[in-house]
Amino acid sequence: MEYDALTDLLAARHSCRAYLPDEVPREVIEQILRAAQRVPSWCNAQPWQVHVTGRAETDRLREALYEHAQSGDHAPDVPFPAAYTDQHQARRRACGWQLYEAVGVEKGDRVGSTRQMMENFRFFGAPHMVLITAPRELGDYAYLDCGGFITGFALAAQALGLGTIPQAAVASFAPFLRDWFDVAEDRVILVGIAFGYPDRENAANGFRTDRADLDVWVSWR
């Protein structure tokens, strides 16, 4: 039964791109954070530190970040992938077109696709955002540990009826976020997670991505 509960959560979790305006109670957010911090980390270092925004602060931030993002002055602390090729590019494109089809953006509509992409910087209307940082001195393995924290956060939120979307796009404006949250230079800004109660009627939440078959990515020895 425990395995079934876990797989049900994994299957139900998705990147939520439309939210109800209702604020999540502080005690519920604390439940999610306590659950997420139970994930494994190297030597139990628990390298993550997070900033959580309430509704009023999220509203202030979304407008400021959206305006700043118009500059296109991307400067992530962690370099983005140099390229997506082969199956990785195919999966990326499939996900993008599923979203565009769901929200009525036709192929070739650059204005529509850009407008949808820019909703990242409004957190898709979510009432809350978590910014995750890691210490520079711990390097790449701290980033891996924080990836586990992201998964734990998303699953705990799903279990409590909330939606989430981890957002690398937000972290692409690291200097802006560093100033906004007063993040010390000895920490790396990794990712934001928008979260809240999902708007289940919104078309942006009406599709699900697939997963590759085991024989595509598993080698048995």
Image (spheres, grey):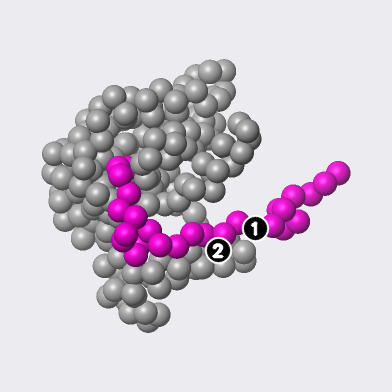
Instruction: Examine the rendered structure and indicate whether residue 56 appears above or below residue 19.
Output: above
Q: Secondary structure at mark 1?
A: loop
Mark 1 is on which residue type? Ala
Mark yes or no: residue 202 visible: yes
- Does residue 159 sit above or below 121 in this rendering? above
Where is residue 186, by image quadrant? top left
Q: Are marks 2 and 1 in contact (CB under 8 Å)?
A: yes
Position in image of residue 148 (x %, y %): 51, 34
Q: Nearer the viewer, residue 197 or 81?
A: 197
Residue for point 39% across, 35% down: 160
Q: Residue at x 27, y 58 (%)?
A: 119
Q: Secondary structure at mark 2?
A: helix
Q: Which mark is residue 212?
A: 1
Residue at 51% from the left image edge and 31% from the top image edge: 145
Along the viewing direction, whichever of 74 and 120 lies nearer the viewer? 120
Q: Quadrant of the N terminus?
A: top right
Write down the region rendered in magenta.
Answer: 195-221
Q: Is residue 1 above or below residue 214?
A: above
Foreground pick, 17 / 174: 17
Provide the major secondary structure of the magenta segment: loop
> Label 2 is placed on what type of residue?
Arg
Mark 1, Cα crowd under 10 Å, few <14 / some 14-19 / many 20+, is: few
Expressed as whole percent of the image width and height from the top left, the position of residue 25 reads 24, 30
Q: Which residue is mark 2?
A: 91
